[in-house]
Amino acid sequence: MTAPPRETLSGRLVLRGDPGYEQARVGRIFNARRPDRFPAGVLLAESDDDVIEGIRLAAERGWTVTVRSGGHSWAAWSLRDDVLLIDLGAMHDLAYEPVTGIVSARPAVKGGLELQPFLAERGRAFPGGHCPSVGLGGYLLQGGQGWNGRARGWACESVVGLDVVTADGQLVYADARENADLLWAARGAGPGFPGVVTRFHLQTYEAPRAMWHDTWTFRLDDTVELLTWLHHVLPGLDRRVEPVVAATRLPDVPLHEGTARPDGTVLLLHTTVMTDSDADALAALAPLQDGPLAGRELGHVQARTSVIEENLAQAGQNPEGYRYAVDCTWTDAPAQVLAPRLHALWSELDTEHSFSIWYGWAPRRDLPDMAFSVEADAYVATYAIYADDADDARYRDWVHRRTAALAAAHGAGVYLGDTDFTRRQDRFLSDDAYRRLVGIRAARDPSGRFAAYLTADPAGLNVHG
């Protein structure tokens, strides 16, 4: 018989079989495809002290610990059998220090819905995630692919400090001078981080005075010519310019007056740029105005925008209440290899909300010394979005099979935020970074209190090829 919860956690620790358990188990998971995995209990933490008590209780009962921040992990990594799941959803306060420009934020703070407006009121900015409801915890620990990322780098590079509850139930602070191993690991380890981050300290930046978007609509059959041109011009673009090609079936795309939208998939070349002036933005976008497809587009819109507007558009592409199967690959494949494969994949998108992206990152730069350590010239991710659970097996098989075929041709690895290691694994850290992380985990969590990566093949973790 399970002992009753500690009095200090009364009302916040929900054990399996208790009223409210199912809501605590999956109520905050974004993906409607929710696995049949059942924690021993869910701690709805409201403070650092709750997290500390939870870690100590888990040690007493022999439970492994998982953590949920925003609930956006496609594979629901926090959901494991017979663990203590510490849910940080009630911890989402923010504070700003104007002298240093540092904002402190809880892991459940939503980057687009909460952090961005908070900073905008203060004339500041941070490279938050594209999907506005993503919590900062998973986003930052996995690297953080966000707005203005080509110029500002990965969001985790702007993490300057952490409050962390360690495996022995102690609250410690980590930065570049104190507990520096934890800061290193927090920048890219994802669910392999050996602790519970209860607060991030983030360096913010002066908000750009101008943000513009440049959006072209093309036919699917233009894939090869479009990507061949983009691979050519990308290395010479201003790093503030962020071009993304999205293959989409959504009906609401830019179209010239009198132009009918073709059936099925179309391509959006959607580029954003953040600068100090409108003139600077237009100059940075100029190289994209006279490509080989100019004059053959279905539609074109160029206008001022904002992170809030862009986030709203992202939310429309990532609707709530649907089931998701997702995979990705970093690739250095030349356009003549990659483009035909993407054309084949994109032609198979068959639901209204399903989409796939090519995200240009070239030229690559030297990364700081941090766990995050795998990227390539282009990032490709595919999101199968559907409503019927009867389609789970079909869409999961399709997205992972198609992505594996892409990865086989000059693939470099994956980004943790768009993976599901229960179906397909690949390298997510460099070999050196992975070995270093294994050593930090062994030193910080020798008893294995914290669950690591949810994988079908532990021996194949971080193995490429």
Image (cartoon, rainbow, N blue to C red):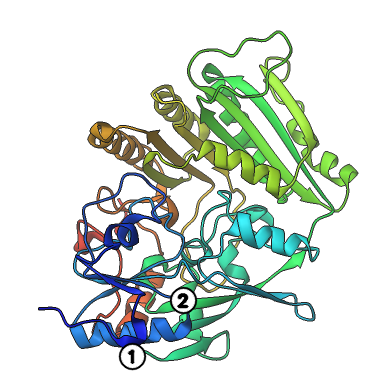
Going from N to C along the chain, the mark reached first, 2 or 1, is: 2
Q: Residue furthest left?
A: 1
Looking at the image, residue 187 sits to the left or right of residue 45; the answer is right
Q: Amino acid at mark 1?
A: Asp
The quadrant of the image that shows the N terminus is bottom left
Residues tagged 2 and 1 counted as in contact (Cβ below 8 A): no
Which residue is located at x 42 percent, y 75 percent? 45
Amino acid under disc 2:
Glu
Residue 437's x, y, as percent?
A: 37, 75
Vertical placement of residue 410 versus 206, above or below: above
| Residue 270 visible at all | yes
Instruction: Give left or right: position of 413 versus 201.
Output: left
The residue labelled by disc 1 is 168
Alpha carbon separation for disc pair 2 and 1: 19 Å
Q: Closer to the camera, 154 or 26?
A: 26
Residue at coordinates 21% horizontally, 70% vertically from top-left? Answer: 40
Of the pair 264 and 14, the residue shown nearer to us:
14
The quadrant in which residue 406 appears is top left
Depicted 29 relative to depicted 20: above or below: above
- Residue 237 seen in the figure: no
- Label 1: state its secondary structure: loop
Residue 109 lies in quadrant? bottom right
- Residue 233 place in picture, x, y as percent: 67, 37
Q: Which residue bears the numbered disc 2?
A: 46
The x, y position of residue 460, in whole percent, is 23, 59
Q: Which dot, 2 or 1, sits closer to the camera?
A: 2
Looking at the rendered structure, which numbered label has been put on residue 76? Answer: none
Mark 2 element type = loop
Q: Quadrant of residue 327?
A: top left
Residue drawn where x is 24% and y is 63% of the image: 80
